[in-house]
Image (cartoon, helix red, strand yellow):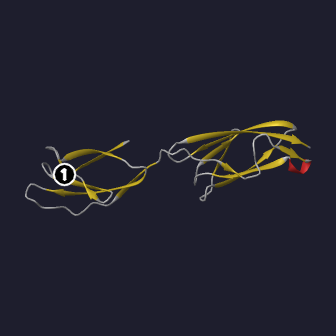
Amino acid sequence: PNFVFQGYTEPKSQVIINYQGVNLDPVQTDDTGSFELKVGLDEGENTFSAIAIDQAGNSSAQSKTEVVILDTQIPEINLLEDIVDGMSVVGKDKQLFSLEGQTESAAKITINDRFLFAKADGSFAYRYRLQEGENLINIQVEDKAGNQIVKNLKLIFKP
């Protein structure tokens, strides 16, 4: 995906954008001082800064470094090892079942239309009241970038 780097400075100047520690080819500003440059982003953290050079050759100070994060990876849902699709849960004392797992930090989690957020370390826990027989559980995870994953479980509860 492309990121459009835009800005303005003195008209008819050159702008040199530093992307990931490398200076890109200079960009000429228009009569109003505006400029635009499309840059292909890398997955993860991308850093940008810029300097302007006017027609007389004077350079500006380097701009503040900005960070753009590209996240196209689908988050993972890792449930505790002993939670598997089709498993039987036996005993009245286990009716309030603890769904616990790991995903991305601060991801939004939906468990059968109930919302919660993963902790900073990505862990999550939800107490789900099982009904006798088959219980269909739909777990959806959406990370901060909007990437989503769905996992469906069937748990069989026998009091």
Classify residue 35 as left or right of residue 21. Answer: left
Side (left or right) of 13 relative to 101:
left
- Residue at horizontal 26%, vertical 49%? 7
Q: Residue furthest left?
A: 56
Position above or below: 62 against 99: below
Q: How many marks?
A: 1
Secondary structure category for the residue under label 1: loop
Q: Which residue is mark 1?
A: 26
Q: Quadrant of the N terminus?
A: top left
Residue 38: % across, % down: 29, 43
Residue 52, picture quadrant: bottom left
Which residue is at the front of the view, 32 or 71? Answer: 71
Q: Residue at x 17, y 47 (%)?
A: 29
User: Crowding near pointer 1: few (<14 within 10 Å), some, many (20+)?
Assistant: some
- The x, y position of residue 35, in whole percent, is 22, 46
Q: Is residue 151 above or below residue 21?
A: above
At x 80%, y 48%, the residue is: 97
Side (left or right) of 64 relative to 125: left
Instruction: Give the x, y percent position of residue 47.
Output: 35, 56
